[in-house]
Amino acid sequence: MDDDQSAEETAFVVDEVSSIVKESLEAVIGRNTYEHKRVNQWTSGVVEQCLGQLSKLGKPFKYIVTCIIMQKNGAGLQSASSCFWDNTTDGSCTVRWENKHLYCIVSVFGLAI
Amino acid sequence: MANQPLPLSQETLAQFNRSMATEPGVSGPPRRRLGSISTRRSSKDQSKDQPHHRPLFLRGMTVISSESSFLSPNVSHSHISMGKRFSFAGWHQGGRVSFSGLYLQQPIQEVYVENTYRMGPEPGCHFSPSRTQQILQATLDSYLDGVCYSPDSCSQLCQMLADLVLSKLKDVNPPRYKLVCQVVVGQSGKQGIRVASRSLMNPNTDNYTSAVFQNHSLFAVALVHDQ
């Protein structure tokens, strides 16, 4: 039982991370339209808030958070990632979010220490 | 134990008693005796009794085999195997080595080495952002030059690029470093886009690089984090 608990505490839980990301997106961007001047601020805000919440989880992980915000103009976008890590301990989570005016893709990679 | 005709059993018993006399204090079945024989005594036996015992045993054996009694096999086996035991008992010339039990090899001692905990990369073995950036830019330029964006093929192209960059960087990667590589490919339209990343890491050992490529129909951004 102790082993199970400790394994859960030190594992990368995708659901937990995705809920943190969605909350940050709602809080920072919300229903705003795409504004070129404010995008810089938004990306920094989303990323910083995500990192802050993730570090509060207190798990022995190094985190990488990437945020892509794109205006809805009919253009296509593809994103792919490949990782060279330890499959048993490390994990990633990608959240696709959108509102009426923009798309947002946030990827979180967790690397165990 | 012996239900044999009297003349034969007497002879075998006599032989038995003679051998028993040379090993005082031993009683019980012959098999048990095998386990508690000392080489010192055996050397004496060999030197003194060999000329006597062997011919006697042989004689005994020939006589016994014709009659095939119950007791004789035990006796003959015991004496023969005693002789065998002595031959590889590890007896040194002029020394007194005694042991009891079977001859066993010394168990191979395992060498225990202390743990060496490495807390960081070796000096000079760090991730090099400039070299990685050159590799990244060269890969993007070579693979995306003249390529047109199409929704069907670009998803595979994106994944392929990510795997390719990873395989190229694995060769130049210092040992025990983990790599995270992300590639974003998008259509060049009249839209605005921003790609940002931040990481929680050890600034002494970890770093990241990025490269951008753009042509008339598509753009690509590659991000590599090394930890």
Image (spheres, grey):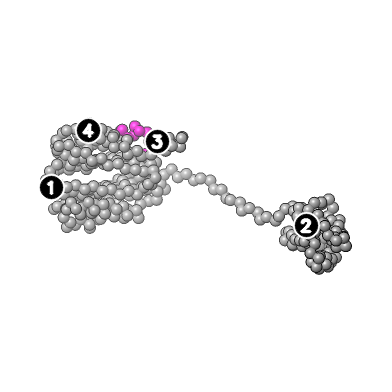
Amino acid type at image mark 4? Glu
> Is label 1 on the same chain as label 4?
no
- Disc 3 is placed on an element classified as helix
Contact? badges 3 and 2 (CB < 8 Å): no
Q: Which residue is mark 2?
A: B39
Residue at the disc numbered 3 = A9
CB atoms at circles 2 and 1 under 8 Å apart? no
Q: Looking at the figure, which quarter contains the C terminus of chain B?
A: top left
Q: Which residues are magenta?
A: A52-61
Position of residue B142 measured from the top left corner of the image (x, y, whole percent)? 22, 58
Q: Secondary structure at mark 1?
A: loop
The image shows residue B34 at horizontal and vertical percentages of 76, 55
Residue occupied by mark 1: B189
In the rendered structure, which amino acid carries the disc numbered 2?
Thr
Q: Residue at x 21, y 48 (%)?
A: A78
* Residue type indicated by callout 3: Glu
According to the picture, the residue beneath numbered tag 4 turns out to be A26
* Number of dots carrying numbers: 4
Q: Disc 2 is attached to a residue of which chain? A: B
Q: Residue at x 83, y 60 (%)?
A: B4
Residue at 72% over, 53% down: B101
Q: CA distance from mark 1 to mark 3?
A: 44 Å
- Residue type at numbered disc 1: Gly
Comes first in the chain, label 2 or label 1: 2
Residue drawn where x is 17% and y is 56% of the image: B147
